[in-house]
Image (tube, grey):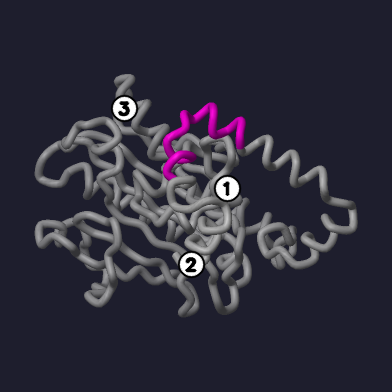
Amino acid sequence: MGVLARVLRSVGGEEVLDRLAGLSGSDLTSLLLALARRRAGALSGADVLRQYRSDRFVAPSSVPFPVLRAAEDRLLAALPSSFSVLGLAPVAPLGTCSAVAEMDQNNILSTMRGTEVAADPTNALALEAALLRQAGSDDVRLAAMQRVVRAQLFGGAGRFAHFTLFAAVSAGRDRGSLAFEREHFAEHVAFLREACGDVEFRVTVLDPRFEVVRGDLPVDPSRHTGYYKGLCFKVFRDGEEIGDGGFVDWTARLTGNRKERLLISGIGVDRFATL
């Protein structure tokens, strides 16, 4: 907040931010586009190249493309035919991550047009699954491969400002006795084993009733659960975490129907590809 306070003082104080926040979406977009046009007009080619050299968001992936593509092909080839693979848009509605998955908006690359750069395909797939469920579809199985951007700083090998995520979601209605949960969790686990080879699952049971869903997979009691409900898991290969998943209440909240159920899982393709 120190930087923000300094900037607000330089442009007229806190009331400036309040007035901007109070603008309609279209008016704010017009203002921001005019601002971007003016700032871009002051740039030279050398300025653009200078930013390209130093900006972590725009540099190409450090993973060779053939290696990355081979990992993508392996994941898609193992996906059960019951899943529909979508080509997701590179942007999502503003708040897709913060309002649905409760991720800090500061970790998302927001745009000037009331959207945000894709940060996690499971969120966009949840939106599509909610629409399909509201339209009367039975159990919905969706998957996507998407290059995403995260604004927070990561450290260590295999952690990038932008990277490819493979995501799969299964949505449906509560059938009682955790029947939906047991069926779809087993399906996701079987697929991830087929796709990723010799992997280890570590499961955190958040609700004792979900012990029947876990089966004989090893327990990880120390995990911070985040937004998962009932049960969540992490996937490891060669001791490195490559993915995670679990049950969330996103479609229930999106549709206003507490009977809706959603299981998500994801694999960090760049990390998987480098192992």
Identify the main secondary structure in magenta.
Answer: helix
Q: Position of residue 255 (x, y in %)?
A: 27, 30
Boundaries of the magenta span: 18-31
Task: Name the residue located 55 percent from the left edge and 77 percent from the top edge.
Answer: 155
Horizontal side of residue 104 vs 30, given as left or right:
left
Kindly state the secondary structure of the residue where label 1 is placed: strand
In this figure, which residue is indicated by the disc labeled 3?
A: 133
Q: Amino acid at mark 1?
A: Gln
Q: Which mark is residue 146?
A: 1
Q: Which residue is located at x 48 percent, y 50 percent?
A: 120
Disc nearer the start of the sequence (3/1): 3
Other-residue count near label 2 (Cα within 10 Å), few / some / many at <14 / 14–19 / ≥20:
many
Task: Name the residue at 38% across, 39% down.
Answer: 126
Q: Quadrant of the C terminus?
A: bottom right
Magenta stretch: includes residue 19: yes
Amino acid residing under circle 3: Arg
The x, y position of residue 130, in whole percent, is 34, 31
In the image, 147: left or right of 181? right
The one of 137 and 259 positioned closer to us in this rendering = 259
What residue do we see at 41% from left, 48% from top?
A: 97
Residue that badge 2 annotates: 242
Q: Which mark is residue 207?
A: none
- Residue 193 inside the magenta-drawn segment: no
Q: Amino acid at mark 2?
A: Ile
Ranked by sequence position, the earlier of labels 2 and 1 is 1
Q: Secondary structure at mark 3?
A: helix
Crowd tier of the residue under label 3, counting other residues whose Cα lies within 10 Å: few below 14, some 14–19, many 20 or above: some
Label 2 sits on a secondary structure element that is strand
